[in-house]
Amino acid sequence: MILAYLAFAWLLGLAAAAFTDVNPWASVAAASLLAAASLGYRPRPSTLLAVAVAAAFIVTVAWRYQSTLPPETPSGIALYNDGNAVRFRALVTGEPDESLTAVRYRLSTRELLTDDGWLSLEGGVLMFGPLPPRFQYGDLLEINGKLETPPEFEDFNYREYLLRQGIGSTIAFPETQILARDQGNPIRAGIIDLRQHLSDALQDALPEPQASLSTAILLGQRSSLPQDLSDDLNATGTAHLVAVSGQNISLVAGSLVAALAWFIGRRPAAWLALVAIVGYAILVGGQPSVLRAAVMGGLYVVAIALGRQNSAPLTLAVAGAAMTGFDPQLAKDVSFQLSFAATLGLMTLAPALRARGETLASRWPSIAEFPYTRPTIELLAITLAAIAFTLPLVAINFHRLSLIAPLANLLAVPAFLAVIVSAGITTVVGSFSGPAADALAWLAWLPPTYMIAVIQACADLPFASIELNGVGVGHAIGYFLALAAIVWLLARRQPSPRPQTILPAPAERHYPLPWQGAAITLVLANAVLWLFITAPAGGRLSVTFLDVGQGDAILIRAPEGNNILVDGGPSGEALASALGRHLPVWDDDIDLVVLTHPDADHVTGLLTVLDRYDVKQVLASPLEADSAVYRAWRQAIEDEGIPYHKAQAGVRFDLGGGAHILTLHPPPGALAEDPNNNSVVLQLVMGQASILLTADLEAAGEFALLDAAPPLRSTVFQVPHHGSNSSSTPELLRDVQPFMAIVSVGENNRFGHPAPEVLERLPAKLVYRTDRNGDITISTDGNKLWVEVQRP
């Protein structure tokens, strides 16, 4: 108790210093408040000594916090921010973090090139690099570029955020070369390699977005989550399910205890959950933030295992004081705040909510005797407790409040556990045998599919989340004081269940009844049947213009089921997510990949396709490029041993079912050294319907196409070059005379595509755009057209 009292004093003093910019009067107020509360609770002379020691702690922590504040003036490599380009050497100290358009690397500087030679220099740098080539943890790099000071936004101080992590500079897309590999910690490098191996196995077995969600939950790798799914997670208050935090780990542990308590008892289940926490912390990387989260979750589980839930909050306070004593800047770390608050809620509020839920259920014998009543009550108690204790922190830091969070978590958390188990099994099996993992794909596909459906459905509800502006520290203090009073009242007024009907003791074993197992089997069977019912109708030619941002990617499904992919867009993750929306889980074959020309917004995503799909052959523009991404593409084709063909006009591909593809461009002789005007132009024909795919053809290429090709009249016309005014000449439009036009374009792109002039001169009666309509699917049986869009 004495240790916990001093720990509380430390945390109180730290909060006073951190959230008032080390105002000395805040420390005085904190000490006075603690003294008044202590003497009011125990008015004895001996309490004065404890108060004096606590006051000394409060003063000490204020000094300690101030001494660890990031320096106001730059130092080390940051001294060269915002000047001319510099050349320096640095080590990659973390896992690459890939987004849709770039990869972020955390670097530790070693040397800087000056007029006098290489000078030893330290400092953290955040580097933004292109998607390929990709560097790895432990790579020693030589970098030439311009260092920048991280910006300070109106509602978020990005510079301070990075400084707390030891990073004082950023650099975007510099010239980079590798000097040496494997220069990092070999143990951490081994863990990172293992995670990457497991991640690859999972992504090979599952389509997107199920693969990204499962990888985020199982391995803590969130960067590949599609943006729309990430937005839905935030709107529904379920984002913590893909974040490695104390809340997440405590939720995993608490849910495991709730799920296993019926079979092996509550305390044995807690010990198994503790083992799971240790393994999970190691698997997701073992970084300091992960270890802190594991400690918090472990304390919660140990309290259950030892039957000491009442003393668990005191232990958490001691652990929090120890962590912040080592690094006081954790007080401003949002993930630490959320982890600590959520774990405290699980320790204090969840038991009281669980007890009242069981008392309420005991009033109805049919509900009380149902085998899943207790796990449901415990899951709901855990969810509500975590939400209640993190609500003001979310409002302050993210300015949003999810009104649907309790329902969304109640529906999603059971699938969260199923994702961990099924994805874990599939990943381990897939790391040894790809075909065996493919056989288990259904097992790992169903839980994330259900979870995504629940999250999307909840996010689409009216008022799923609301904006909360103007919430500050004062509001949070008032909220937590009220919440503490509620917890205290609930703890004092323990419910007494009705004697005639009480819930069975958790040590008793209850197994699912046969009818329940049959019901689950029927549900799964119906889900599988529904997939086949909703699959695209056979015998049709289907062309989907995929929404992958500012670039092209087109999926063609032939009448007999063959898959053809034309271009890959600017991002592998965006393309994988788009393909996952249209290819069934069992179909990982791409019979033909067509690269219309070697620009990055067409070729980049194809690197991911070569990695995740079984590509049979490649057709590409005869004009090549001297770029890193194109070299990586050609090297990957060579490594995979995929047949590679150069496109030229006049080649015809029979797709079966009366459909075929004509290659109309480029001519046998390339048109100068212009990638756009040497784009591969394809015309898909089935019966009376035809679809013209024009890639990035510009005016010169269009005139060459008109001179060499047969009449180009087509039902559906892909507007060339994303609607640029350099294309779609009146001559081409007169020859094509399309009924429908499709523009593949990124939302709010910096080029202003599509140009208003192009939209005005299009003769098409219908115009669809991927930036507004999302994925656009045109299917035909040769007589009719069917159009389906992702967004109306």
Image (cartoon, grey):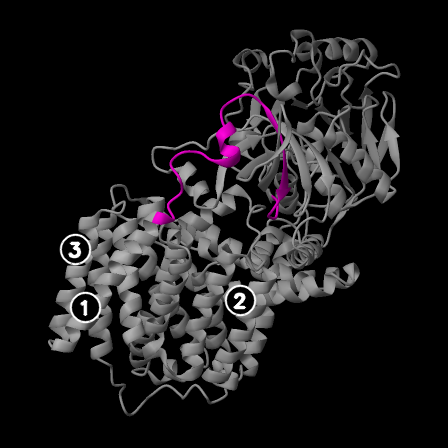
Q: Mark number for residue 307?
A: none
Q: Which residue is mark 2?
A: 417
Above or below, 350 against 20 in this view is below
Amino acid type at circle 3 is Ala
Asked whether the residues under the numbered discs 3 and 2 touch, taking CB atoms below 8 Å apart as contact, a structural biologist would say: no
- Which of the two labelled residues, at mark 2 and mark 1, occupies the earlier sequence position? 1
Q: CA distance from mark 2 to mark 1?
A: 45 Å
Above or below, 117 against 64 in this view is above
User: Magenta includes 162?
Assistant: no
Q: Nearer the viewer, residue 588 or 347?
A: 347
Of circles 3 and 2, the one toward us is 3
Q: Residue at x 26, y 88 (%)?
A: 498
Q: Mark number for residue 29?
A: 3
- Which of the two labelled residues, at mark 3 and mark 2, occupies the earlier sequence position? 3
Above or below, 361 against 33 in this view is below
Above or below, 506 against 413 in this view is below
Q: Nearer the viewer, residue 466 or 729?
A: 466
- Which of the two labelled residues, at mark 1 and mark 3, occupies the earlier sequence position? 3
Q: CA distance from mark 1 to mark 3?
A: 13 Å
Q: Is residue 659 left or right of residue 515?
A: right
Quadrant into which the N terminus falls: bottom left
Image coords of residue 114 (percent x, y): 61, 26
Q: Which residue is mark 1?
A: 51
Amino acid type at circle 1 is Val
- Provide the residue span drawn in magenta: 67-96
Image coords of residue 752 (percent x, y): 53, 18
